[in-house]
Amino acid sequence: QVQLVESGGGLVQAGGSLRLSCAASGRTFSSYVMGWFRQAPGKEREFVAAINWSGGTTSYANSMKGRFTISRDNAKNTVYLQMNSLKPEDTAVYYCAGSSRGWPVPRVSRYEYDYWGQGTQVTVSS
């Protein structure tokens, strides 16, 4: 079992930055693919970014490339999402997720993730 707790959300002006953190419990954290998803009101939950077990390989949704950076610190059982140049359309609840399915291909579907945090709200004002 892995439990995930997100933090770092908040209100920021357009063009600003936030760093989200996801603290994981469980000794097997370092073996999991970790991902970030987001869900805006009335919309489907969508993929943001993912990172393999070592942190050496990442994948991003096209609209986040160049603005968002996912990273992890396995010694701290934590995964991060650095978000820069934020836009009002980035407003959503951001979820951290863990997948035990490995990384033969990037895990971009929410259905490939086994564990989820409760989410943290990010609001970007114009």
Image: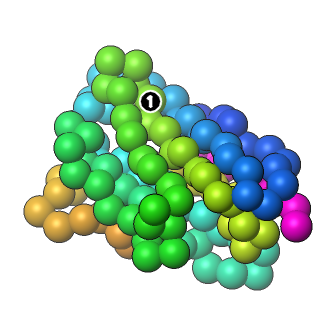
- In the depicted structure, whether residue 40 falls above or below residue 2: below
In the depicted view, which residue is nearer to us: 93 or 100? 93
In the depicted view, which residue is nearer to us: 5 or 59? 59
Is 20 on the left-hand or right-hand side of 1?
right
Q: Is residue 61 at least partly visible in the picture?
A: yes
- The image quadrant of residue 1 is top left
Q: How many marks?
A: 1
Is 59 on the left-hand or right-hand side of 78?
left
Which x, y percent locates residue 118? 65, 47
Is 29 on the left-hand or right-hand side of 94?
left
Residue at position x 72%, y 67% from top? 87
> Badge 1, how many Cα within 10 Å: few under 14, some, many 20+?
many
Q: Over which residues does the magenta segment extend?
A: 117-126
Residue at position x 73%, y 73% from top? 89
| Residue extending furthest toward the right | 126
Is 24 on the left-hand or right-hand side of 17?
left
- In the depicted structure, whether residue 109 falls above or below residue 56: below
Which x, y percent locates residue 116? 51, 50
What amino acid is found at the position of numbered circle 1 in the picture? Thr
| Residue extending furthest toward the top | 75
- In the depicted structure, whether residue 89 falls above or below residue 24: below
Q: Is residue 91 at least partly visible in the picture?
A: no
Residue at position x 65%, y 58% from top? 85
- In the depicted structure, whether residue 106 falls above or below residue 76: below
Q: Check residue 57 for magenta coloring.
A: no
Report the residue marked by disc 1.
Answer: 78
